[in-house]
Amino acid sequence: MNFKNNTVVDFLIAIFLSHIYYRITFIENLGGEFSLVNQIKNSNVTSQNFFVESPTFTLLALGLGIDNLDIYKLLIYLITLGSLFLIVLNVQYLESYSTLFILSGWLITSSWFLGYVDIVSVLLMVLISKNIAQDNISASRTGVYFLLLCLNHNAISIGVSIIYLIFTKKRMILKVGLVILASQLIGNVLIQYYLNKINFAGRGRLRFIFNDNVIENATSFVGSNILIVLWSGFFGTLVIMVLISNVLAWSEVKIIIITLLIALFFTSIALDTSRVFSLLVVPISLHVLNLYKKEVSFKNKLAITYTITISLIIIIGVNYFHGSKITSSPMNEFETFYDYVPRIINSVMSNIWK
């Protein structure tokens, strides 16, 4: 085990927060999403929901020949766990500030909505941020990451692509811009090909935005609950976000404010308010933490920063906006993860434990 960096402690913190403090849950419509697998096998797609546009888990289930909901749940959990480890491993470029990223709002979203592809989106954004943070980025590698992000969730991909483009240094903006443009075009063409191939007849995300009252309700949610939205998105990293105006140059702060407003704009056209916002600000959190690592002599006060951050997390607690203010997962009407695990283990071990 490598104890020289934060990998071990970050992973243990991530497991504790997701499994104990936030308490992970499967999405309530997971059965409906899994039914898409059989619908595709039978060439009779009746699902109308726009989750069909995010085919990562569906394609994996088809490729692995999974035809059981319990096995599908296990697949999603293992992908979540593996992605969590890879996220922790790849944020170590932030050095002492990596743990602050683990304490931010994306982990709440990834814990409460097992079945959505959010954790995969976060992993890809971490890989993109890590690659862009290097002085000589690999266009091919970055392009693959952006393409996979688009295929995984094309709406989130559009929002974060704009944010990444704003953060890109002038000497690399053409290179990164072309990579983003190509990946978006190719990704959306491939998604449309996939939807046509399975004969999907439902409304996509873009069409959904223009349904009656969607934009009105979404903007109302954000405008009336702006403090909750900001807290839920940044969570532990909000302390650093508040400090940036005092320790970074205004030119850097101005760019961060612009990207934050873009994240809020995209959040304002989506009803899953805190969920969407917590994903859109992942590149912002990573960028700010990387700036601290490179430009701010703050390490001697890092312990104080962590103390304040953890204290605020405990005192304020989880405040999340999902149609209304909530402090625990909204996905709790069906079998919980904590009931699912012992049921599966008891089923597997039934003959041994008799």
Image (cartoon, rainbow, N blue to C red):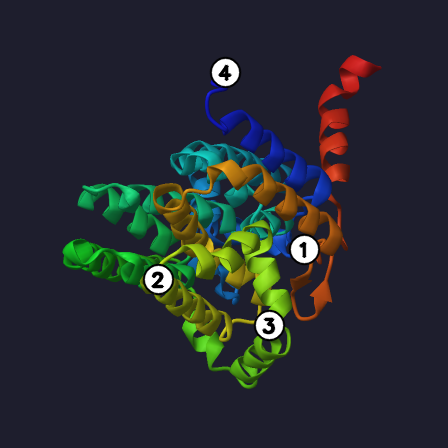
Instruction: Give how far apart the Cα atoms at labels 1 and 2 are.
Output: 31 Å
Mark toward the viewer: 3 or 1: 3
Q: Is residue 123 above or below residue 341?
A: below
**Does label 3 or label 4 sit earlier along the sequence?**
4
Q: Please rate how many residues cluster around mark 3, counting C-alpha atoms within 10 Å: few if below 14, some from 14 to 19, many from 20.
A: some
Instruction: Give how far apart the Cα atoms at labels 2 and 3 are.
Output: 20 Å
Mark on residue 28?
1
**Which amino acid is tagged 2?**
Ile
Q: Please rate how many residues cluster around mark 2, counting C-alpha atoms within 10 Å: few if below 14, some from 14 to 19, many from 20.
A: many
**Does label 2 or label 3 sit earlier along the sequence?**
2
Work out whether residue 106 or residue 348 is closer to the camera in this orientation and state it: 106
**Quarter holding the C terminus?**
top right
**Does label 3 or label 1 sit earlier along the sequence?**
1
Question: Do the residues bearing badges 3 and 1 touch, measured as CB atoms within 8 Å?
Answer: no
Q: Give the secondary structure at mark 1.
A: loop
Residue 17 at x, y = what percent? 66, 40
Q: Residue sitting at 77 percent across and 38 percent down?
A: 339
Q: Give the secondary structure at mark 4.
A: loop
Q: Please rate how many residues cluster around mark 1, counting C-alpha atoms within 10 Å: few if below 14, some from 14 to 19, many from 20.
A: some
Which residue is denoted by mark 3 in the rendering? 226
Q: Please rate how many residues cluster around mark 4, counting C-alpha atoms within 10 Å: few if below 14, some from 14 to 19, many from 20.
A: few
Which residue is denoted by mark 4 in the rendering? 1
